[in-house]
Image (tube, rainbow, N blue to C red):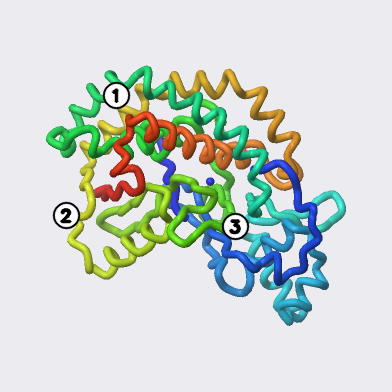
């Protein structure tokens, strides 16, 4: 079974009511988040050649001519950018022959209806872990590298990431979505550009996410809801300025196998919960502005991230996840 990793690298109901001008639309920072198969990510750099900005502006229905004028692009440069986005599978043409995003672009303010529904479902979904907490702890004791570490200290990693998120995603993909992520470029991944109006140090829309640094020998991951801190930790690790043994939990292949087994133990309950709500999910999707831009599976992948983030907050509020450990869970997957 393939594993799916959420990089940072996770919908919404109403389209822009607007109309803002381009400078106002782009005034806030947008984070590019990726849910990928085998650490796949875009082959093109969205931070270059205005690619990310063009993606955002297409979602906000700005016409081609206005985009060209704003960036001072001639036809050749604009078409080159469009070709990069189209070739990567991040945009497509609609029935009017106009380019629109084929991935999620989430503006601040658009999340209100979505987050409200996701929060309610996420709180309810937390009951699965609560009801099975003894079983989870029992399996946890068999994870070789973690057996001497109190469960409470690993509660964010195990309850937030293994039960519901990082290790659970391939099972959700297989059992609920019954499909791999979209084939884009040379890989398969979901992508969202998320506007972040929160204070520095907070994940976009308060999402719990996995930031990843992939090397030949290991994959370092920081799971939590503080994107900027995760970035800095991984940057220091990449520069060998951190002692990985002291700052990261090291998970060898045997550990990873046991965590996958723990996720599999929880899969039937989570899948059953999602299936009970499938009709509701479909209605939410069909009533969203995103139905004309993305598939149900891509919409749901990000909607589920909102659900999991509320599940994590609920488990923290109820002290199943240790509050002092609830912001960051750095770990290294040894290859």
| Element carrying mark 3 | strand
- Say which of marks 1 and 3 sits in front: 3
**Are there few (<14), some (14-19), or many (20+) residues within 10 Å of tag 2?**
few
Kindly tell me whether residue 105 is visible in this rendering: no
316 relative to 269, above or below = below
Q: Mark 2 points at which residue?
A: 246
Q: Name the residue under label 1.
A: 136
The image quarter in which residue 317 lies: top left
**Are there few (<14), some (14-19), or many (20+) residues within 10 Å of tag 1?**
many
Q: Mark 3 points at which residue?
A: 195
- How many labels, in total? 3
Image quadrant where one finds the N terminus: top left
Earlier sequence position, callout 1 versus callout 3: 1
- Determine the residue positioned at 39% across, 47% down: 224
Q: Is there CB contact under 8 Å for labels 1 and 2?
A: no
What is the x, y in percent for residue 88? 61, 58
- Determine the residue positioned at 56% across, 39% down: 301
Q: In this view, does 192 lie to the left or right of 334?
A: right
| Element carrying mark 1 | helix
| Element carrying mark 2 | helix
Q: On residue 181, which mark appears?
A: none
Residue at mark 1 to residue at mark 2: CA–CA distance: 26 Å
Earlier sequence position, callout 2 versus callout 3: 3
């Amino acid at each position: 079974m393939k594993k799916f990793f959420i990089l940072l690298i996770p919908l919404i109901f109403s389209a822009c009511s607007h109309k803002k001008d381009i400078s106002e639309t782009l005034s806030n920072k947008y984070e590019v988040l990726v849910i990928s198969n085998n650490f796949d990510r875009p082959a093109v750099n969205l931070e270059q050649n205005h690619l990310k900005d063009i993606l955002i502006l297409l979602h906000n229905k700005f016409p081609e001519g206005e985009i060209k004028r704003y960036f001072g692009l001639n036809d050749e440069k604009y078409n080159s950018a469009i070709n990069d986005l189209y070739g990567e599978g991040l945009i497509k043409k609609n029935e009017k022959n106009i380019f629109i995003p084929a991935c999620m672009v989430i503006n601040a303010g658009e999340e209100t209806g979505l987050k409200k529904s996701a929060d309610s479902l996420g709180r309810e979904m937390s009951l699965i872990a609560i009801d099975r907490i003894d079983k989870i702890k029992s399996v946890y004791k068999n994870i070789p590298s973690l057996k001497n570490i109190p469960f409470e200290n690993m509660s964010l990693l195990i309850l937030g990431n293994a039960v519901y998120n990082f290790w659970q995603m391939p099972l959700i993909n297989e059992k609920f979505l019954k499909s791999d992520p979209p084939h884009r470029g040379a890989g398969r991944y979901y992508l969202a550009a998320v506007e972040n109006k929160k204070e520095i140090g907070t994940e976009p829309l308060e999402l719990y996410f996995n930031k990843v640094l992939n090397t030949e020998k290991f994959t370092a991951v920081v799971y939590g809801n503080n994107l900027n801190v995760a970035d800095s930790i991984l940057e220091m690790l990449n520069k060998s300025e951190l002692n990985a043994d002291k700052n990261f939990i090291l998970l060898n292949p045997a550990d990873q196998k046991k965590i996958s087994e723990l996720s599999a133990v929880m899969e039937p309950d989570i899948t059953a919960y999602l299936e009970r709500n499938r009709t509701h999910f479909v209605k939410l999707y069909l009533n969203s502005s995103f139905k004309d831009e993305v598939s149900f599976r891509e919409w749901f992948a990000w909607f589920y991230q909102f659900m999991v983030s509320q599940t994590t907050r609920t488990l923290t509020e109820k002290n199943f996840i240790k509050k002092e450990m609830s912001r960051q869970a750095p770990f290294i997957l040894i290859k």
